[in-house]
Image: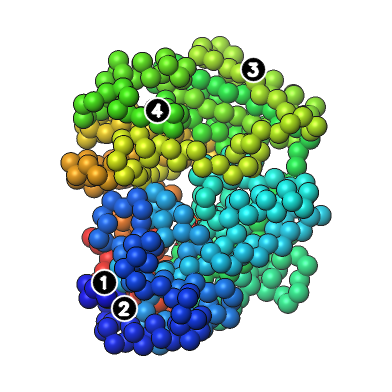
Amino acid sequence: MPLRLLPPGMTPVRLRAAQRRFAAILGADRVFFDELDRETYSDQFAISPDSHVPIGAVAPESVEEIRAIVAVANAYKLPLWPISRGKNLGYGGSAPVLSGSVVLDLSRMKKIEVDRENGVVLVEPGVSFYDLHDYLQTNDIPLWLSVPGNSWGSVAGNALDRGVGYTTYGDHTSKICGLEVVLPDGDLVRTGMGAMANAPTWQLYRYGYGPAWDQLFVQSNFGIVTKLGLWLMPRPESMMGLELNFDKPEDLEWAVDILAGLRREGLLQQAPSIGNWLRAAAVLTKREDWHDQPGALPDSVIAAIRRKFQLGWWGTSVRVYGRESVNRAAISAIKSAFKGHRLMSMERTHWVDGEPLERSAWVGAPITFPMQNVGWHGGRGGHIGFSPVLPANGRLAMEQFRQTYARYKEFGMDYQASFAMGERHLTNVNAILFNQDDPAMMARIHPFFRTLVADAKARGYAEYRAHIEHMDLVAETYDFNNHALRRLNERVKDALDPNGVIAPGKSGIWPARLRTRRRR
Ligand code: ADP
């Protein structure tokens, strides 16, 4: 085993002893400490391939096994990095922040309990979107999922990292209702109404009594989630929508203002994402088909690509779900909100129960084709996201777009971005597409990313989610009262996890023992 990968304070002899204890709990076939295992659990879209390498992985199948593993981790001060399915591509995949951590792979825990009448599900971490979709179909359960654009991952892991989907249930983390968690000391808790043994309301009422803890285990390293309750959408009578294309970059301003108003009003309950031409084009074609020079794409090439695929500079999709009569009225009201503005195109979509159902994210069918965008540059592709949260305001969105687009050009990168409309905010997801086999391009990623973070910080904006490489950088921008939130997080961390064994460094939260590892 490579010595450089040993976690802080660990010796090869002690690590081997811990491995033997893991094997005694799980059997040797669920303990993975070979070179190939390390590679498999590393980040497949790595931007710093040597910085986040796990020493190995273990794959428990039950809560009791997890508790036994946590006891070993505490005895040896060996950090664990819990993953559900480890498909968090663009944010680190299954790889840990701290090299030498042991990946706690929960992908074999696949229990699904659906409460059909109440429209809720309780899933274990290993349940993928495909698993749950198949389960609902096979058992003819009239509930729809909300799936992310790349639906390879798990229902639980996605909600725990604040992933999003496209239906009215698309803010996944807001649909969490009740967790079961193994704490860093091995204790087992249930949150909300689950704190009462056998409560039939665990997945029905979020808060329980006293402080509500669900969100404390989201994007955090305070525990290992072993069950997650989630609300699902009752299969609607109809789904209607609009496909909108906008011709000019400046159209972003009024498009945001119109959609923001519809969201605040509540007429539009799903979060439309306004994406630029490359978001659509990168899954349809490759850069080399159009241009063979480095640097940002010239406007003439952009125009040619847009022409070929009939793409707006920006495009978005809007959907409403529910009663047919209500949807008809809602869609015509939404349509009329765009009156007086010149759209490149506007098409209606229409589905009512009884008609064949499309297989798309709009109806909660898992999809993976958006991942095609990693092929844009050729070679071993990959991407990371830079996703600051903005007010839902057209002028501010336009300013952010102008500044970011100029930075993409300055660093010779192709601009792929979207603005997703929350109820009161806008998430500006900028994808940075790269080719891991192009050293010159890879050398630009870090300075580029740091510049984007600094630009956003100067405007008072920060990211909602970060790649393992940037967790400290992003946490650093949350600086009110000299990082009071970080101090609070780390006081809680130290109280719950005195040996610092669960996901050190996750979201910039370090246990006392490893705090010197924080990157400044
Ligand atoms: P997915 O496979 O759904 O894309 P991951 O398993 O990669 O999701 O999880 C995303 C991130 O969320 C992980 O890196 C990890 O930090 C955290 N996470 C995932 N599952 C758990 C869990 N069961 N308990 C605690 N944290 C988790």
Query: Where is residue 116, by image quadrant?
Result: bottom right
Q: Which residue is mark 3?
A: 336
Q: At 47% from the left edge and 64% from the top edge, which residue is drawn? A: 83
N-terminal-most mark, 2 or 4: 4
Q: Which residue is mark 1?
A: 5
Nearest to the eye among marks 2 and 3: give it.
2
- x and y percentages locating residue 470 in the rendered image: 32, 54
Left/right of residue 382 with respect to residue 347 in the rendered view: left
N-terminal-most mark, 3 or 1: 1
- Looking at the picture, the colour scheme in use is rainbow
Q: Which residue is mark 2?
A: 513
- Indicate the secondary structure of the residue bearing disc 1: helix
Q: At 42% from the left edge and 60% from the top edge, which residue is drawn? A: 94
Left/right of residue 284 with respect to residue 196 in the rendered view: left
N-terminal-most mark, 2 or 3: 3
Asked if labels 3 and 4 touch by Cβ distance under 8 angstroms, the answer is: no
Query: Vertically, is 346 above or below 25?
Result: above
Query: Vertically, is 404 above or below 146?
Result: above
Q: Tell me the kind of residue under disc 2.
A: Arg
Q: At 51% from the left edge and 80% from the top edge, which residue is drawn? A: 26
Q: At 34% from the left edge and 20% from the top edge, which residue is drawn? A: 302
Q: Residues within 10 Å of mark 1 (few under 14, many from 20)?
A: some
Query: Vertically, is 518 above or below 328?
Result: below
N-terminal-most mark, 4 or 1: 1
